[in-house]
């Protein structure tokens, strides 16, 4: 029997369970009784601590629509992997030990950039690893899309849609903070889908005067409200000149929170006189059932990973390139991330639509 380990690591997102199901169903369909799936619990922590569950086909029923991850997940920062002193555990050695003890033929790791970094490390240590790209941030290098992203776009868009009601009724400026870590994909897509008037992204430092001018101009043109989609990673032109450490310290000192949204709202209210409010949908953006798009993507990615297992093709991660499912070498993508390039068509679309990008 081929013994296939599978784990989910990093933040949860819609489509994790659908991908697990995609892998399992395709493996059982192709290999039948010749495969045994072993679920490693709570990400790399389970691999370090030897927490696992031998799975059977019944465990994978009903997963297509289920949010979160049946395997549990945890954030295990990559820098902690190499730290032995703190807790006196050689984590890499511990992970290798569990892999060997469970007699795994390979391990599938579902996660984002951090997960892929560790996956590459384990691959370099001689383990047979296959990655699967998960994140609502859509910032994994080498793939056009990650599962979880489009569901989060749908949720954030719904938030922006609903905020329009209050914005219009109260003649307010509404600032919605969108997740995405250091990438603006989620904000750009949901901002355009939700009809935001101003979209502020980590990739384009904003100038608060330009933002305020855009609000005033809208009022002059007869709109009594404005909607700002603000990426949680948005920074202003002054912060862009500093090191991250420096501006995060300055933000902490000013006491308006770690993200820019509250200070943008306060500045807009002060400079334009419009009543302003902040809305932070937060983790709702990664909650619940995956969208139809993500269910399809999870099934495409999961079944492709099963094909890789069958072919003993390791040291790779599944990816979408030119709208085709393929794979990248872990070594080629680990430690990198994907931001919105200036050449992105959607930026041009936003500008053409008169959306202020800061
Ligand atoms: O990577 C997904 C994400 O939701 C980011 O958009 C966000 O910055 C981060 O995770 C939040 O992490 P946590 O759930 O650990 O607070």
Image (spheres, rainbow, N blue to C red):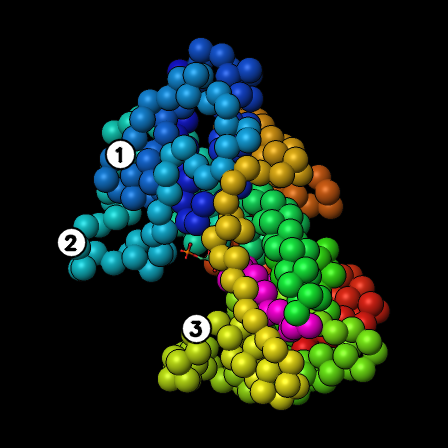
Residue 124 image point, x, y percent? 40, 46
Q: Which mark is residue 91?
A: none
Q: Nearer the viewer, mark 1 or mark 2?
A: 1
Per the image, the residue denoted by label 3 is 258
Q: Where is 137 relative to 355, above or below? A: above
N-term mark: 1 or 2: 1
Residue extending farthest to the left is: 88
Q: Residue at x 50, y 23 (%)?
A: 62
Q: Where is 329 relative to 174, above or below? A: above
Label 3 residue SS:
loop
Per the image, the residue denoted by label 1 is 51
Q: How many marks?
A: 3
Is 181 covered by the magenta stretch? yes
Residue 261 image point, x, y percent? 53, 73
Contact between marks 1 and 3 (CB within 8 A): the answer is no
Is 65 covered by the magenta stretch? no
Q: Is mark 3 within 8 Å of ligand 1?
A: no
N-term mark: 1 or 3: 1
Q: Quadrant of residue 327?
A: top right
Q: Is residue 228 visible?
A: no
Per the image, the residue denoted by label 2 is 88
Residue extending farthest to the front is: 169
Q: Is residue 164 visible?
A: yes
CA gap between label 1 and label 3 equals 35 Å
């Amino acid at each position: 029997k081929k013994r296939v380990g599978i784990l989910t690591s990093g933040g949860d997102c819609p489509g994790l369970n659908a991908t697990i199901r995609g892998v399992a169903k395709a493996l059982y369909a192709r290999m039948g009784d010749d495969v045994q799936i072993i679920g490693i619990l709570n990400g790399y922590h389970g691999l370090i601590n030897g927490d696992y569950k031998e799975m059977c086909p019944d465990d994978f029923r009903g997963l297509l629509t289920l949010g979160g991850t049946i395997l549990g997940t945890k954030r295990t920062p990559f820098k902690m992997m190499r730290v032995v002193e703190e807790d006196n555990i050689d984590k890499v050695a511990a992970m290798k030990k569990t892999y060997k003890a469970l007699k795994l033929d390979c391990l599938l790791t579902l996660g984002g950039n951090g997960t892929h970094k560790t996956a590459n490390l384990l691959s370099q240590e001689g383990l047979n690893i296959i990655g699967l790209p998960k994140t609502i941030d859509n910032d994994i290098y080498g793939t056009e899309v990650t599962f979880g992203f489009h569901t989060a776009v749908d949720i954030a868009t719904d938030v922006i849609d609903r905020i329009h009601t209050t914005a219009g009724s109260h003649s307010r400026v509404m600032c919605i903070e969108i997740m995405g870590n250091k990438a603006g994909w989620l904000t750009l897509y949901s901002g355009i889908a939700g009809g935001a008037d101003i979209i502020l992204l980590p990739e384009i430092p904003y100038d608060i005067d330009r933002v305020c001018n855009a609000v005033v101009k809208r009022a002059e043109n007869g709109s009594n409200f404005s909607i700002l989609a603000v990426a949680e990673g948005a920074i202003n032109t002054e912060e862009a000149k500093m090191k991250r450490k420096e501006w995060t310290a300055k933000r902490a000192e000013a006491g308006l929170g770690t993200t820019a949204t509250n200070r943008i709202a306060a500045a807009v209210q002060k400079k334009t006189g419009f009543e302003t409010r902040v809305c932070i949908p937060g983790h709702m953006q990664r909650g619940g059932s995956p969208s139809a798009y993500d269910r399809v993507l999870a099934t495409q990615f999961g079944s492709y990973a099963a094909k890789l297992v069958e072919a003993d093709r390791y040291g790779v991660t599944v990816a979408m390139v030119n709208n085709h499912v393929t794979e990248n070498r872990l070594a080629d993508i680990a430690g990198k991330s994907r931001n919105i390039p200036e050449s992105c068509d959607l930026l041009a679309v936003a500008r053409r639509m008169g959306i202020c990008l800061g």
